[in-house]
Image: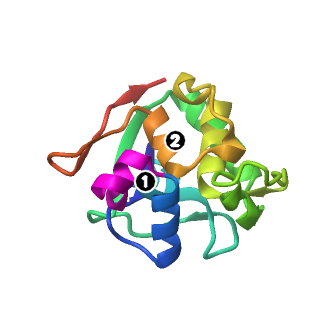
Amino acid sequence: MQVIFYGNKHGSAFDNIIRWKTSSWRSRFNGDWKYSFSHVEILCDDGYMFSASQYDNKVRRAKHSYTGRAWIRMSIDISDTNKEKILRYMSSRLGSKYDYFGVVGFVFPSIKQDKKKDFCSEFCTLALQDLGLKEVKYLKPSKTSPNDLAFALGLKFDSKTKRWLIPHLRL
């Protein structure tokens, strides 16, 4: 299984706003915010990805291209039992509406969460918490941005090389 992050100087104006607003002040100052993330998905071994998509307006399972420099992939080794567990959880959320207000909620904390809707990093955080991944247990999913999730999982950005340093996790 892989958690894959989208960003790295690509995307729409909406992606740029998310990347800039959820980056640290240091990243904004030195321009590294352009390399941060605006979207996250969970990639299964069969090539299908699960996430909440603003383009589909729902949680979906889709097979699409995740190649190129826009996607940063992080592997997580999990047992077959845990694969079944996370697939059950993600499948149970299929079709849930996309939470547009929730996206604004990780920028403006006073916005309330709609429990029947998800945005990408919220969905992925909830799935990884359901799996029992210790790196994300302290995160509040409704306030977690793609960047927050990336850093919680141990990704680090090297400002000198402009590359992400990617750990390998085991559950």
Q: Position of residue 112 (x, y in %)?
A: 83, 52
Which is more N-terminal, label 1 or label 2? 1
Q: Quadrant of residue 144?
A: top right
In 3D space, how far apart are the residues under numbered discs 2 and 1 (Cα atoms)? 9 Å
Residue closer to the observer: 66 or 80: 66
Q: Position of residue 163 (x, y in %)?
A: 22, 49
Residue closer to the observer: 75 or 69: 69
Please give the range of residues in magenta.
23-35
Residue shown at 46% from the left, 77% from the top:
12
Quadrant of the image for the N terminus? Answer: top left
Which residue is under mark 1? 5
**Does 110 sit above or below residue 14?**
above
Marker disc for residue 19:
none
Task: Tell whether 19 sits left or right of 117.
Answer: left
Residue shown at 63% from the left, 33% from the top:
139
Q: Position of residue 52 (x, y in %)?
A: 64, 61
Which residue is under mark 2? 149
Look at label 1 and name its amino acid.
Phe
Q: Position of residue 41 (x, y in %)?
A: 52, 54
Task: Tell whether 99 sits left or right of 81.
Answer: right
Q: How many numbered marks are there?
A: 2
Magenta includes 97? no
Q: Quadrant of residue 167?
A: top left
Look at label 2 and name its amino acid.
Leu
Residue shown at 68% from the left, 36% from the top:
140
Residue shown at 39% from the left, 32% from the top:
154
Name the main secondary structure of what is drawn in magenta. Answer: helix
Res 1 seen here: no
